[in-house]
Image (spheres, rainbow, N blue to C red):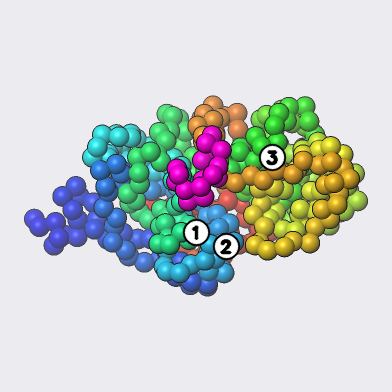
């Protein structure tokens, strides 16, 4: 039978697929789109789960994530896992039937100066589901995605796809903790315990940091942080309590100037503050003089590089406790409701979309 008449190609894959598409501020749609056809170095992955990230929320709510502004409709999603259903034609990457996580970055060598061992800082780097470049880079909140085989990381036997859906955000947290250096035996403070902050707590715990104090404005994130390894919790309004922590290492993951102020106040003299929460563009009102008088080391943390391999291994052997971070799952047709739940940090952690 003619593949065009049946709506499927010769491999039996549908020609139209359901996708989650941001059209502009406040305009999120679940709609049918043409399935992207794979190039020679691309495999087709049947997506099983996609985690809703803060950047996805920003594209939906504001039509922009930081300085990346939507100029055309864009498929969202970069925290995805699934199974290869069609391997790359050039023979690269995992074979069909392999469960995979996705490293969503495409560095751009030669696009500007950056340390060669840190391709995440490549100026022209693209990321799945990002409007940083024009044309935008579509994401993978779609039933079948054609993805470069170099992005795919085979998952070990025994690591289920639901838990593996946290590979990408856990890699962001792993990179942030690594930016602090050796944390074993050092006290730690995590400001903001959304999914990245909670995962940073888990990574700190695995790395031997302690005691670990978690700070948030809501009870639910603090409950999750405790479940993955926090020794103490504080409400974000407790300025005196935060200042009394005097942590050797602070991970700022709230992405707010208030959170950064708390991070500076909660760091011990000579301590290290790692900033992983993405602040809005433009000047920020923070007590930066504290960084001078306390000789604090302020370090940025942006995405990740090869840490994804270590994260997959740690999830597979159970040494990285992450299950409490996942709080909700929704089928793709309910994506708008899923986004509404994900935006409410007082009731949710990581919200997953299921692609049946």
Name the residue that disc number 3 marks: 201
Q: Which residues are magenta?
A: 108-125
Label 1, secondary structure: give it: loop
Q: Which mark is residue 132?
A: 1
Foreground mark, 3 or 2, reads 2
For label 2, the crowd category at 10 Å Cα-Cα, with few meaning under 14, some 14 to 19 and many 20 or more, is: few
Is 239 located above or below residue 43 in the figure?
below
Label 3, secondary structure: give it: helix
Sequence-earlier tag: 3 or 2: 2
Residue 11 shown in magenta: no
What is the distance, in whole Å, between disc 2 and disc 1 at their CAs? 7 Å
Q: Quadrant of residue 157?
A: top left
Mark 2–mark 1 contact, CB under 8 Å?
yes
Q: Quadrant of residue 198?
A: top right
For label 1, the crowd category at 10 Å Cα-Cα, with few meaning under 14, some 14 to 19 and many 20 or more, is: some
- The chief SS type of the magenta part is loop
Q: Which mark is residue 67?
A: 2
């Amino acid at each position: 039978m003619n593949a065009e008449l049946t709506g499927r190609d010769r491999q039996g894959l549908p020609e139209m697929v359901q996708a989650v598409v941001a059209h502009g501020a406040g305009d999120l749609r679940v709609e049918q789109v043409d399935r992207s056809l794979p190039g020679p170095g691309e495999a087709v992955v049947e997506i099983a789960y996609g985690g809703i990230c803060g950047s996805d929320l920003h594209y939906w709510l504001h039509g922009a994530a930081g300085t990346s502004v939507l100029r055309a409709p864009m498929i969202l999603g970069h925290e995805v896992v699934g199974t290869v259903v069609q391997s790359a034609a050039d023979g690269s990457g995992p074979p069909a039937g392999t469960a995979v996580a996705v490293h969503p970055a495409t560095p751009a060598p030669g696009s500007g100066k950056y340390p060669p061992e840190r391709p995440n800082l490549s100026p022209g780097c693209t990321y799945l589901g990002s409007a940083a470049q024009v044309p935008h880079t579509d994401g993978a909140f779609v039933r079948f995605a054609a993805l470069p085989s170099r992005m795919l990381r085979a998952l070990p036997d025994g690591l289920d796809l639901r838990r593996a859906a946290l590979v990408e955000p856990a890699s962001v947290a792993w990179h942030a903790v690594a930016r602090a250096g050796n944390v074993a035996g050092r006290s730690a403070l995590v400001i903001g315990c959304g999914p990245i902050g909670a995962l940073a707590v888990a990574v700190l715990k695995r790395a031997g940091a302690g005691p670990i104090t978690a700070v948030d404005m809501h009870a639910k994130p603090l409950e999750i942080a405790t479940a993955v390894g926090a020794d103490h919790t504080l409400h974000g309004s407790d300025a005196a309590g935060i200042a009394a922590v005097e942590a050797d290492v602070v991970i700022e993951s709230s992405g707010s100037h208030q959170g950064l102020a708390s991070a500076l106040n909660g760091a011990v003299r000579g301590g290290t503050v790692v900033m992983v929460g993405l602040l809005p563009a433009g000047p920020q009102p923070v007590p930066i003089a504290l960084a001078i008088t306390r000789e604090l080391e302020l370090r940025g943390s942006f995405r990740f590089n090869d840490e994804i391999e270590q994260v997959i291994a740690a999830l597979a052997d159970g040494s990285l406790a992450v299950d409490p971070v996942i709080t909700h799952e929704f089928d793709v047709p309910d994506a708008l409701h899923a986004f509404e739940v994900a935006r409410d940090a007082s009731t949710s952690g990581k919200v997953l979309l299921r692609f049946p």
